[in-house]
Image (cartoon, rainbow, N blue to C red):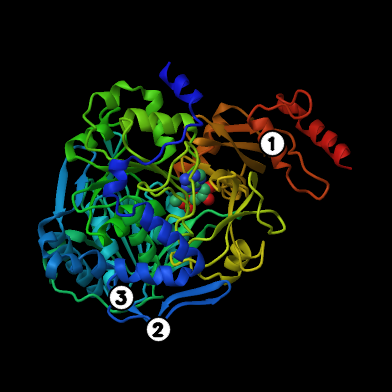
Amino acid sequence: MPDIESLLKEKRVFKPSPEFSRQANWNRKTVAEYRKLGSTNPTRFWAKMAKEHVSWFTPWKKVLDWKPPFAKWFVGAKLNVSYNCLDRHLEGENAWRRNKAAIIWEGEPGDSRVITYAQLHREVCKFANVLKGLGVKKGDRVALYMPMIPELAVAMLACTRIGAPHSIVFGGFSADSLRDRINDAGAVVVITADGGYRRGSSFALKPMVDKAVEGADCVEHVVVVKRTGETTGMMSPRDVWWHDLMANASPKCPAAKLDAEHPLFILYTSGTTGKPKGILHTTGGYLVHVATTAKAIFDLKDEDVFWCSADIGWITGHSYVIYGPLANGATTVMYEGVPTHPGPDRWWSIIERWGVSVFYTAPTAIRTFIRLGDQHPKKHDLSSLRLLGTVGEPINPEAWIWYHRVIGGRKCPIVDTWWQTETGGIMITPLPGAVATKPGSATLAFPGIDAEVLSEEGDPTKPPGGGFLAIRKPWPGMLRGIWGDNQRYAETYWSKWKNIYFAGDGAHREKDGYFWIMGRVDDVMNISGHRIGTMEVESALVSHQLVAEAAVVGRPDEITGTAIVAFVTVRVGTKTDVDLVDTLRNHVTKEIGAIAKPKEIRFTDALPKTRSGKIMRRLLRDIASGKDTVGDTTTLEDYSVLAALRESDDG
Ligand code: WTA
């Protein structure tokens, strides 16, 4: 068993090869220099990056204005993100990029489109004019609920061109979730498609939007891309077809000169309450952060074909499918469907056919492929790959080694990158030409980022040791707030310690300073790399008429990292059978979306609680993962007994 053999070697250190280091955008010398500058004078370091990686219409007066917990970066500067991702690649010495592929897109049914920088620029200008024609003004919010099709990229860039912050809602969220997000952001336009393709068949999106918009009075128009051709009721004058509007749109639209702190986008993410948080990112700092990290960590060169497999509905897709790569003039791959359609080798076939050279994916996907077997990647020539990356959850060393061996052919460095929706860009990561990697460790903080592992009291942990992951100084890509809720922003991220950012993750630090991320320490679960709050699922469950009470916990899962387990007490007289399990699972899907569907539902007469009425989650987590807590706790009837036992223990 080769995987067992690899397991035994998991303590190995992988040094960057001399060949890779020699050609790296950032070699050892650069990294050493930047680390020094980044720790002694982080604002000077970021100002240097800002000049190198971003084009500005007006320079800044001050790099950072920090009035904790509120930061302003590049104060007084003006720029435009779509100008940085498009126009500047068509001008002067970069003009040769006009005909370079900006986006290589592949639909699930096998259709594909290659869009050059000049073409993408034209489409974006046209759609920016469409938005203006619909009455969208600078500062207005636009909601996007779309499949992974090129029009999604066009819509995002068009929003940034006119300064209308976008709010992208992942297509897997339900109509109810979409409505909440539209209302919270006060979006005036929703952009969607009739449907998309997944697992070999089409699914409808527009009916979900219809349902969502019924209860969202702020929405004036719904723009619909024709993708699947499913029949869709168009409500005039609210609903308009993308192709009708584009047919007459002018391809000339100057990029708005926006303030560096102008809102760029809102992206909702789960927190520890039932209500998702609208994470706000702004223009200048975010772009500096993602452009710099994409160039340094993914070592992007003009010849590269970069593929980040994340859906654009998540932060990883925002930062590293679209903004980071395009700001660098790179070629970025977008794929519409599931990894296993029509066969388990679809991804490897994409890598072979398009010559992908840098590939960035999630551990959960890697674990799925390990289970499907080595024969699928082995059918394909993956020799175009030169660098691999992972994100979203801790990667177990077996998966790391498999990725290195089977996908990377033992020659590709792996960058395990830690970051969050809130951080905007990558924070802890290897630099592939300079940092030795250890399977399972995200290694060291990016230059200019002051990451530390702290105790409850805020003291740095003496390595080796564990604690809470914290960022001690502001950074350019940091969230600027929670949309409409400054108080929650201050409380969630800045109240554990004074003026220090609390990430919500536990981490361990070795003597060599390497970070090992241990996972969430709050009531947020990480399902296949997606954040779901336990409270969100609980409120969805108790909104069902037959449910009296619910407690939700995560338990370890071989593929998805964590699986959702719900403990439910029902109203008196309700039959707790498999039908009810189905009903409740579907109810959660309806309320939140399929990603939040509990894997398991267990009925119980009572939930174990402390005297103050707090649900004893640790106990439930132990029970859900089959661990022995106090004696034999595997039978459901024992909960109340157990709770009583625990209470007497505590007291
Ligand atoms: C987890 C995704 C371990 C972590 C970019 C974090 C990771 C949450 C890693 C953010 C990693 C992300 N190793 N854990 N390399 N990357 N995480 O907001 O728990 O969807 O807090 O952003 O994912 O998830 P989010």
Say if residue 224 shows up in the picture: yes
Task: Return the x and y of residue 625 as percentages of the image width and height.
Answer: 63, 30
Could you tell me if residue 210 is visible in this image? no
Q: Residues within 10 Å of mark 1 (few under 14, many from 20)?
A: many
- Badge 3 marks a residue whose secondary structure is strand
Q: Position of residue 437 (x, y in %)?
A: 44, 41
Report the mark closest to the observer, 1 or 2. Answer: 2
Image quarter where the N terminus lies is top left
Q: Residue at x 46, y 72 (%)?
A: 43
Where does label 1 land, which residue? Answer: 620
* Residue sticking out furthest to the top: 1
Image coordinates of residue 240 in percent, x first then y, are 23, 63
Query: Is 100 positioned to the left or the right of 445 in the image?
Result: left
Residue where numbered disc 2 is placed: 61
Mark 3 or mark 1: which is in front?
Answer: 3
According to the picture, the residue beneath numbered tag 3 turns out to be: 79
- Nearer to me, 110 or 101: 101
Residue at image x 36%, y 46%? 432
